[in-house]
Amino acid sequence: MKRAAIQRRVPRSWPARAHGLSLLEVMIALVLGLLVVAAAIGIFASNKATFRSTDSLGIVQETARTSFELMARDMREAAGNPCVNNLPIANVVVTNATSWWSNFTDWGATTRGYGATETFPSLSFGTGEGQRISGTEALQLISGDNNVSTISAHNTAGGVFTVNRNDHGIAAGDLVLVCNSRQAAVFQASAVNGANITYAASGSPGNCSINLGLVGVGEACSTRAPFEFAAPNSVLVRLNASRWYIANNPNGRPSLYHTRLSGGGVSNEEVAEGVSAMSVTYLMRTGVEYVPPATVGGNWANVIAARIALTLDGQPNTGTGGTPLQRQTIHVVSLRNRNL
């Protein structure tokens, strides 16, 4: 009796009753979770867009730096030669429709701008790869190289120059500039053997004569008289010729292109993707403001500086409303060989 009473006083340990989540609680939890996920996705998308815009802006800045650095280097050297800029030139290189770099006979033509509707010789407007885009301006520059060699001997009868070094940087097919205090001459090297540079009346486009004397107005190349560039008061360099313009690249995007003379032919090189327009204005020696190519007319010999404006496009879908980020940058270059 006593044991039974004791047992009745000991409370039994029953398991607690389990309670589940109600449907309302589950729905609230789902809504809160969706809000957190949506906020995270929004932050991620915003950061991604910011990164793309920043990256695109960085590409635009790098494109501007590369474009202006290379163009400015070419422009500063324009009209440069190891003698003086007012020498008469005997140019014996055969002129044809494709040799745009062979027909200059004075240093005034070594800098030449082309307006938005002016066509390049041998390069038409178009939308294909490497074709100049309509409505964009262009630039053509010619100069002598900095690697100057002194002439040791000139065989006028055989058309051979001997210079004082083998590392003159000239190869067969290159255009060559030779000058002294009296005149300059431009010819195409047909063969190079060490210090000997031969120029024959053949090749592509070749030379019309091996005589490097000047001719009168309207006279044929065959009527040139021999002219000796005597040692040691004559020097010789490779001639540089280049063109800058806007064209579509293989991806269909506008780019800055550079055409340069190489071995008697030309090579077209893409310099920077995303350059969609170029506009160049020029400062004349007696001018007070920069003017377009049409205003310069045929007076290119008096251009002393250029103001280059490039329109640069970033990567697609990186700007407002999905359009590309676009910036315009301006750079002013002095033609130092015209300001000496």
Image (cartoon, rainbow, N blue to C red):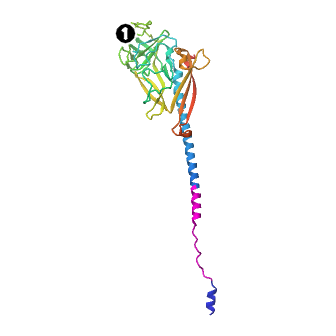
Quarter of the image where one finds residue 51: top right
Residue at the extreme bottom:
1
Could you say which is closer to the camera, residue 79 or residue 253? 253
Image quarter in which the C terminus is found: top right
Quarter of the image where one finds residue 207: top left
Query: Horizontal and vertical percent for residue 248?
Result: 46, 31
Position above or below: 287 against 17: above
Q: Is residue 196 left or right of residue 321?
A: left
- The amino acid pointed to by label 1 is Ala
Query: Horizontal and vertical percent for residue 322?
Result: 53, 40
Could you say which is closer to the camera, residue 59 or residue 250? 250
Residue at the extreme left:
202
Residue at position x 54%, y 16% in the image:
296
Q: Which residues are magenta?
A: 11-34
Residue 220 visible here: yes
Query: Horizontal and vertical percent for residue 2?
Result: 63, 92
Label 1 secondary element: loop
Image quarter in which the N terminus is found: bottom right
Q: Is residue 153 left or right of residue 284?
A: left
Instruction: Verify whether residue 23 appears in magenta.
Output: yes
Could you say which is closer to the camera, residue 238 or residue 235? 238
Q: Residues within 10 Å of mark 1 (few under 14, many from 20)?
A: few
Residue 54 visible here: no
Please give the residue where the numbered disc 1 appears in the rendered image. Answer: 157
Could you say which is closer to the camera, residue 82 or residue 68? 68
